[in-house]
Structure formats: structure tokens, C-alpha cells
Amino acid sequence: MAGSLPSVTLNTGRLMPIVGFGTFQIVGRSQIFRVVDAALASGYRSFDTAAVYGNEEDIGEALRELLPKYGLTRNDIFLTSKLAPSDHGKNAAERAARDSLSRLGVSYLDMYLVHWPGVAGIPMESSRNLQIRTETWNALSALYKQGILRGIGVSNYTVKHLEELFASCEVKPAINQVEFHPHFQQKELFKFCEAHGIHLQAYSSLGGSHNRSLVQDPVVTSISQRLGKSPAQVLLRWAVQQGVGVLPKSVTPNRIAENIKLNFPLSEADMMALASIKRVEKYAWNPARVA
Ligand code: NDP
């Protein structure tokens, strides 16, 4: 249960549960109600959505309807959404944040992330990406200061993107949400974020929805069998034990429950074995070429 798992203290001073519920590709009112209900029952108190997921309205409605069943209110939930790549730029960014608030039916967001360092419609290599995403960041910083966004952060930012952001930003990002798992360990980025007080939050910890090679990796399955834990739990625990947040996505009630039961230790040897997996594979989009 979430109660036995730590929260992380962000550089805003606010707490965030280290395990959140991922909602990419979960759509449709009845499905959203079913999974949000299962997630709340299992102890999730943090939900990750995005404008591009097309599910903000249903998630907002499901939370409003289901929270009282668990004796919870809006303030008990950590809600994250993200700015779409098509909404970069000063005016568009402010409008996008307000639109997300309105679709979710909330007066504030706990976290709002720049989903992607590139601007939709501009070539990845163009230096205009930097100029426009800087405007985006300044617009979000103003909303953070107003308290409508209680935390702001980025997603899919490389060390280069972060260094450029630091050169001009007044508000430092609280989070960098990136692909992170034993097949894509991002050691340099992880170290960089730690050194700058940015919380690294992992996505696709299980390899995403279209690939089973991570949950079927022989190192993962052998640890899983020895400990009597599922491969997913081993992968999620590996991140959490390093202080990295996770956002497992599932529409399957028993998996939803299992993915938050991570209160078991992995030995140093098992942590090392997972960190030593040689296979390097990226399962989601790659921001390395975005200027
Ligand atoms: P995950 O790595 O969480 O994997 C989801 C897949 O794993 C689904 O097919 C799910 O199946 C399956 N699964 C879930 N639990 C288990 C289990 N216990 N055992 C075996 N299989 C399991 O995928 P995502 O790519 O969705 O990443 C998680 C979240 O991270 C997203 O939902 C989103 O919130 C965020 N994200 C952010 C991105 C960004 O650019 N910022 C990019 C990608 C993701 P089923 O649902 O059928 O149970």
C-alpha cells in the first residue's frame, strides 16, 4: 500500500508519492472509472496524465465521483498533467495549462510538465526549439508563482536541454520525467538531476505497452522467481530503491494492486545484477536529436 512506501520531497518543498499511476492509453469513461477505482482501492494517491492522452476530463470526473468513497478529497491526491508539444510558446502555454485545469475540473495542479523539449511543427534540429521552449518555461513559471501550478517540471529533457534551461530560468524544474529502466539506464542524466535537486521520475518502467522484453529479461525473471515477486515488481522496486519515482500503467486490477506493493528490499547483489544488464533498448520516443 502507498502508506508503507515513501514520498519524495520535491525542490518545491512539497511531497509526492514515489509511486504514481500512469494513464497513457487508458481512455473511455467506463474504463477510466474502473481503473481509477481500482487504483484508489489499491492505495495510489498520485495520477499522471497529459493533454495528449485525451483522458483528462474522464479522470477529473472519476476522481470527483470516487474520492468520497475512500474518504478522500482533492487535497489527498497528487495530480500531474503535461503540456502538449503543440502548445509551446508564451500564450499557448498559459492557455494549455488553464485548459488542462478546466478539463480536469480542478483549481490547481500538483505538477505540470513540459511533455517534450521539441515544438510541434518545427524541425527537431532547429534552434527555434530552444527559443520557444524557453518562452514556455517562463509562462509556466508565472503560473507557478500564482499558485495555480504547485510544481512545474519537464519531461524527456536531456542534460543539454536542462543545462540550457538553467542558463535562463528563474524557477528550477522539480521533476524530469524520462524513460528509465534496466535496458535504458540514463546514468549520466540521473546523476545530473540528483546533483541539481531535480527528481527523476521514470516512465515505461515495464517497457511500455507494446514490448515484453523487459518483463521477460532473464535477469529480471530469475530475481523475480527467487523472491516470489512478479517481474514488474522487481523492475519497479529497482527504481524506487534508488529514489526514482515510478508510474506503472495497467488496466488489469490484480496488476494495479501488485504494482504498488513494492515494500520489499532488493539485495545489493540483485540491484547490481539489474544495473549490469548489458542490453540497451529504448522503448519510447527519443529526444536526443531535439536541438
Ligand atoms: P509501462 O511501462 O507502465 O507498461 C505498461 C504495460 O505493462 C501495459 O501493457 C500493462 O498491461 C503492462 N503491465 C502493467 N502491470 C504489469 C504487471 N504487473 N505485470 C506484467 N505486465 C504489466 O508503460 P507506459 O509506457 O504506459 O509508462 C507508464 C506511464 O508513464 C504512462 O502511462 C504515462 O503516465 C507515463 N509516460 C510518460 C511518457 C512521457 O513522455 N512523459 C511516455 C510514456 C509513458 P495492462 O494495462 O494490459 O495490464
Image: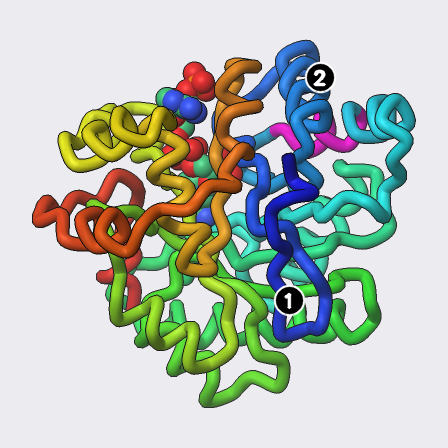
Which mark sits nearer the N-terminus, 1 or 2?
1
The crowding category of the residue bearing disc 2, from other C-alpha atoms within 10 Å (few below 14, some 14 to 19, many at least 20), is many
Dot 1 amino acid type:
Thr
Residue at (49, 69) in percent of width and height: 133
Q: Reply yes or no: does residue 131 show up in magenta.
A: no
Describe residue 111's horizontal placement relative to residue 233 as left or right.
right
User: Can you name the residue that lies furthest to the top here?
Assistant: 30
Q: Determine the CA span between mark 1 and mark 2.
A: 29 Å
Describe residue 266's horizontal placement relative to residue 16 as left or right.
left
Mark whose residue sits in front, 1 or 2: 1
Describe residue 203's horizontal placement relative to residue 72 as left or right.
left
Residue at (34, 49) in percent of width and height: 179
Circle on res. 9:
1
Q: Quadrant of the C terminus?
A: bottom left
Describe residue 245's horizontal placement relative to residue 70 as left or right.
left
The crowding category of the residue bearing disc 1, from other C-alpha atoms within 10 Å (few below 14, some 14 to 19, many at least 20), is some
Circle on res. 33:
2
Q: Quadrant of residue 16?
A: bottom right
Q: Nearer the viewer, residue 65 or 245?
A: 245
Q: Is residue 118 visible?
A: no
Residue 105 is situated, as x and y percent measured from the top left of the image, at 83, 38
Q: Quadrant of residue 223?
A: top left
Residue at (26, 65) in percent of width and height: 187
Dot 2 amino acid type:
Phe
Q: Is residue 21 above or below residue 286?
A: above
Q: Reply yes or no: does residue 59 show up in magenta.
A: yes
Q: Nearer the viewer, residue 1 or 165?
A: 1
Which residues lie in the magenta part?
55-61
Q: Nearer the viewer, residue 261 or 122?
A: 261
Badge 2 element:
helix
Residue 231 is situated, as x and y percent measured from the top left of the image, at 32, 29
Q: Is residue 80 visible?
A: yes
